[in-house]
Amino acid sequence: MNPTAASLLGLLDTCGGELTGGELVRVAQTRIGDFWTLTRSQVYRELTKLESQGYIQPGSPGPRDSRPYRITRSGRSTYRRWLVEELPGETVRIPILLAVAFGGVLPADELRDLLAAAHAEHTKRLARYRELYAELETAGVDAYSLATLSFGIHHEQAVLHWFESLPPEIPSP
Amino acid sequence: MNPTAASLLGLLDTCGGELTGGELVRVAQTRIGDFWTLTRSQVYRELTKLESQGYIQPGSPGPRDSRPYRITRSGRSTYRRWLVEELPGETVRIPILLAVAFGGVLPADELRDLLAAAHAEHTKRLARYRELYAELETAGVDAYSLATLSFGIHHEQAVLHWFESLPPEIPSP
DNA sequence: GCATTGACAGTCCACTGTGGACGGTACACC
DNA sequence: GGTGTACCGTCCACAGTGGACTGTCAATGC
């Protein structure tokens, strides 16, 4: 079991019915998209494997070759166990830090532009998260969804604080 | 050019000499390991490609088939341009958030244990970063290295704040 | 001296994750 | 009805991960 498979099973488990590959991609985008990416290719590959492992079951085909899947009893217990026993650690890949790490060899104005663009990007993202949070909160969404979104907010705030804490030796906006 | 290739060129550029694959893995671990992972397999694959592209040049072989590489003029200009023009966005993959997102279907005590373990882990990491920061600062390391480490500190602080901000409905330590 | 051992340099492979190209199908709109 | 478009799923090439494996050197102990 890998995280992608587990998240697909999680989505199928918590949707209370059947979802096709395309629907899973969409649902994943809104429900876990901010901290976990599911691409279409990945989703369909995993669905094939999950079916062969008996963790999901296809329902009756819909339009355009769409195949809705439903989680099985064994799929449910497997992914829940995976969540608590085999959860991998987080992986961080932050390209902008590469630019900072090697920033000493870059022209000062280019590094500054780079940092300014990233700063603007994160500012926008934070604003979007906050807005979304307010919406979901008033909509009475469950605490778990709010908690993951709240993580995003904490993260973006930290990034912005970091930008603003850069010492004057580093050309920053 | 991909981020891995760029970071290898960056390391070769800023080391002021030659490095073998093994040395690159080690140097990467200490210099950029906290926000970018380089595995051995990846490093050697990239080195082969970088040499065929003329971005690096092998020096005279050392013991145990070790091949030190030096960056070329074209390698230098290519990766520096990449840094400012083609830097990809950050990718975040945080498995613990999967457990939170689907936490509603988990037994409360299991979720709590999971969160407690993660909290302890991040607390330790933050302490380590802070220690390292103090060391590097007194050692008079350049501002760029301190800045990347500082990012790690901001990130870990944010994660811990998030843990502590979880609402009582979510079983947390 | 020589064998054993262990660390190290690099190779290889299977799997996971990303991104874009592609073909077929249904639906909406004229 | 015919056409465009959005959608469903497939496929492929590349990037990234992790572990198994070979060969080499050096230290250690006999």
Image (cartoon, coloured by chain):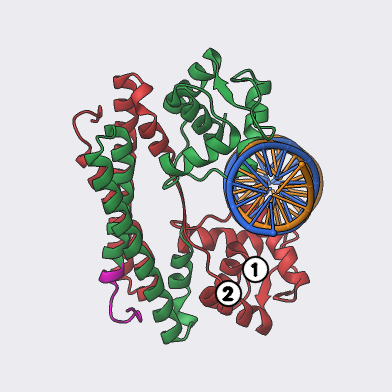
Chain colours: A red, B green, C orange, D blue
Q: Is residue B81 magenta?
A: no
- The residues tagged by marks 1 and 2 sit, at their Cα atoms, a distance apart of 7 Å
Q: Secondary structure at mark 1?
A: loop
Picture residue at 29% right of the left edge, 73% below the top: B166
Answer few, some or many: residues within 10 Å of disc 2's Cα (few below 14, many 20 plus, some between 14 and 19).
some
Residues at circles 1 and 2 in contact by the CB criterion of under 8 Å: yes
Q: Which residue is mark 1?
A: A1
Task: Identify the amino acid type marked 2.
Answer: Trp
Which subunit holds the residue at mark 2? A
Q: Position of residue D11 (x, y in %)?
A: 79, 46
Q: Position of residue B66 (x, y in %)?
A: 65, 32
Picture residue at 34% right of the left edge, 22% below the top: A110
Q: Quadrant of residue A66?
A: bottom right
Give the number of marks. Answer: 2
Q: Nearer the viewer, residue A153 or A18?
A: A153
Which subunit holds the residue at mark 1? A
Q: Which tag, 1 or 2, sits closer to the chain's start?
A: 1
Task: Identify the amino acid type marked 1.
Answer: Met
Q: Quadrant of residue A70?
A: bottom right
Quadrant location, the C terminus of chain B: bottom left
Quadrant location, the N terminus of chain B: top right
Question: Do tags 1 and 2 sit on the same chain?
Answer: yes
Q: Position of residue B169 (x, y in %)?
A: 32, 82
In this picture, which residue range is highlighted in magenta?
B163-173
Q: Quadrant of residue A166?
A: top left
Q: Nearer the viewer, residue A119 or B121?
A: B121
Q: Which residue is mark 2?
A: A82
Residue A93 lies left or right of residue A104; in this view the side is right
